[in-house]
Amino acid sequence: MSDARIQTFAEFWPYYLNEHAKPATRWLHWVGTNIAVATLVAAFVWGPAWLAAVALVPGYAFAWVSHFFIEKNRPATFTYPAWSLIADFKMWALMWTGRLGPHLRQAAA
């Protein structure tokens, strides 16, 4: 599927999963998102407020390293920033709950 034709999140989701085909890529995203969420929580609970902006660093750093060095592709966030953020949290939640497998199988079909 050419990403130029993606018009909905329902179309984007399988594209996103295929861009994260290697388990190490998904796990590095998961780690980065966990650190980002923990940093956001710390910012809101203990402050200072600028710490919330720092949460972006691990979230994107882990993801981009995984794309450039493991997956060897261009992060989808460069083309679809909002959908990529939503998809990252969807993938993160599905990984936490052990329910990502069926989505990966369906995306590969």
Image (cartoon, rainbow, N blue to C red):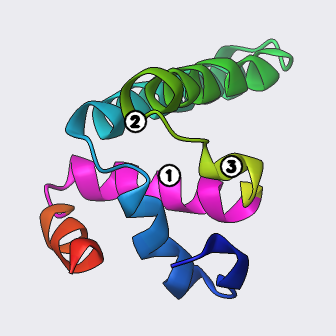
Residue 99: % across, % down: 16, 64
Closer to us: 67 or 2: 2
Secondary structure at numbered mark 3: helix
Q: Is 22 one of the magenta-colored residues? A: no
Secondary structure at numbered mark 1: helix
Closer to us: 46 or 37: 37
Amino acid found under the numbered disc labelled 1:
Asp
Q: Is residue 64 above or below residue 13?
A: above
Could you say which disc has been placed on residue 36 in the image? none
Q: Which quadrant of the rendered structure holds the C terminus?
A: bottom left
Residue at numbered disc 1? 88
Q: Residue furthest right?
A: 50
Residue 38: % across, % down: 51, 24
Residue at numbered disc 2? 71
Amino acid found under the numbered disc labelled 3:
Thr
Q: Is residue 38 above or below residue 71?
A: above
Could you say which disc has been placed on residue 77 in the image? 3
Label 3 crowding class (10 Å Cα cut-off): few <14, some 14-19, many 20+? Answer: some
Q: Is residue 35 left or right of residue 101?
A: right
* Image point (24%, 50%), residue name: 95
Give the foreground label among 2 and 1.
2
Q: Is residue 2 above or below residue 39?
A: below
Residue 65: % across, % down: 51, 20
